[in-house]
Amino acid sequence: MSAESVETIISRAMSEPSFADLLFSEPDQAIAGYDLTAEEVANLRALPRADFDVLAGAGPDERRSFGSALNISETSMHVRR
């Protein structure tokens, strides 16, 4: 279930700029209430904004590589505009 939560967080951050801002400025507030493992929380907290911004504009291959690092699926990382 927690991998699904990471997918939701990343997808939401990619489609809602205000949530992305919150995720990088106040990560604990942004991820509160999500079912995450300690490792997933650490990975999300450690994610550099610049890397996320590159991901948001990346193609499927780059997203797949990024998703593997965070244990999330490629399908969840399609930018929804």
Image: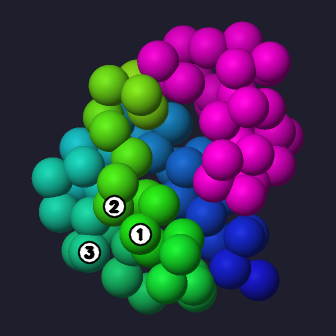
Q: Which badge, 3 or 1, is on the more N-terminal residue?
A: 3
CB contact under 8 Å: marks 2 and 1: yes
The alpha-carbon separation of the residues under discs 2 and 3 comes to 8 Å
Residue drawn at x 54%, y 71% is: 40
The alpha-carbon separation of the residues under discs 2 and 1 comes to 5 Å
- Badge 2: how crowded within 10 Å, few (<14), some, or many (20+)? some
* Residue of label 3: 28
User: Residue 46 versus residue 15: which sits nearer the camera?
Assistant: 46
Q: Position of residue 14 (x, y in %)?
A: 50, 36
* Residue of label 1: 42
Res 48 quadrant in image? top left
* Residue of label 2: 45
Q: Type of residue at label 3?
A: Asp
Residue drawn at x 27%, y 64% is: 27
Q: Which badge, 2 or 3, is on the more N-terminal residue?
A: 3
Q: Secondary structure at mark 2?
A: helix
- Residue 77, compared with residue 33, is above or below; it is above
